[in-house]
Amino acid sequence: MGSFISYFCFVSVGVIISLNPPLWLKFSWISFISGGQAQNLVTSPMTSGYVPLVILFWVLMTFSLPYLAKMEEIMFREGVIDLGDRIKKSIIFGMVHMVMGIPLFVAMLLCITGFIFSIRYCKVYRVLGSEEALLASTSLHMKYNFILITIGCLLVIFL
């Protein structure tokens, strides 16, 4: 139940901030260089609006998500149990995503998401150990990414 409440708070804060973030939270290296808007370089095929490309992107991402999520979970969650270390790793997790061109406010939201993944990791770690904890947090991470990618693609196709 605690994870649900955390996730609900995350989504609520995310929606509120996303509606009209202040200018300084919209900062991205892409917007800095081009003077334009920030854009996630990985998801840029979705912005084309070309339905076959969006579908191809969705298929490729769907097959890639398990590997990408596992890699990130190994880098940012595996073996990290101490609360202070989990907070640091979650902040790094969110900020590393700025490499893809996302704005600062999205990276900050991803810090919260990363911390939620660490909660899952720790809960399973205490009961079943490191390997199962890594699988649990990877599974949550992959499902989260799949839902975001799917909703994004559907919005582009049908709106």
Image: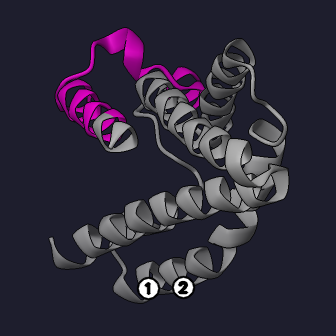
In the rendered image, residue 153, in percent from the top left (x then y), is placed at 35, 72
Q: Which mark is residue 59?
A: 2
As drawn, 32 above or below 36 = above
Q: Residues within 10 Å of mark 1 (few under 14, many from 20)?
A: some
Q: Give the residue pinned by disc 1.
A: 55
Q: Which residue is situated farthest in the bottom direction here?
A: 52
Residue beneath the point at 46% across and 58% down: 144
Look at the image and tell me whether residue 43 can be seen.
Answer: no
Q: For mark 2, give the secondary structure.
A: helix
Residue beneath the point at 72% across and 25% down: 89
User: Is residue 156 located in the magenta-colored stretch of the structure?
Assistant: no
- Span of residues in magenta: 6-34
Q: From the image, state whether disc 1 or disc 2 is nearer to you.
A: 2
Residue beneath the point at 19% across and 24% down: 20
Residue 111: quadrant of the picture? top right
In the rendered image, residue 70, in percent from the top left (x then y), is placed at 75, 60
As drawn, 12 above or below 23 = below
Query: CA–CA distance between discs 1 and 2?
Result: 6 Å
Q: Provide the major secondary structure of the magenta segment.
A: helix
User: Is residue 31 located in the magenta-colored stretch of the structure?
Assistant: yes
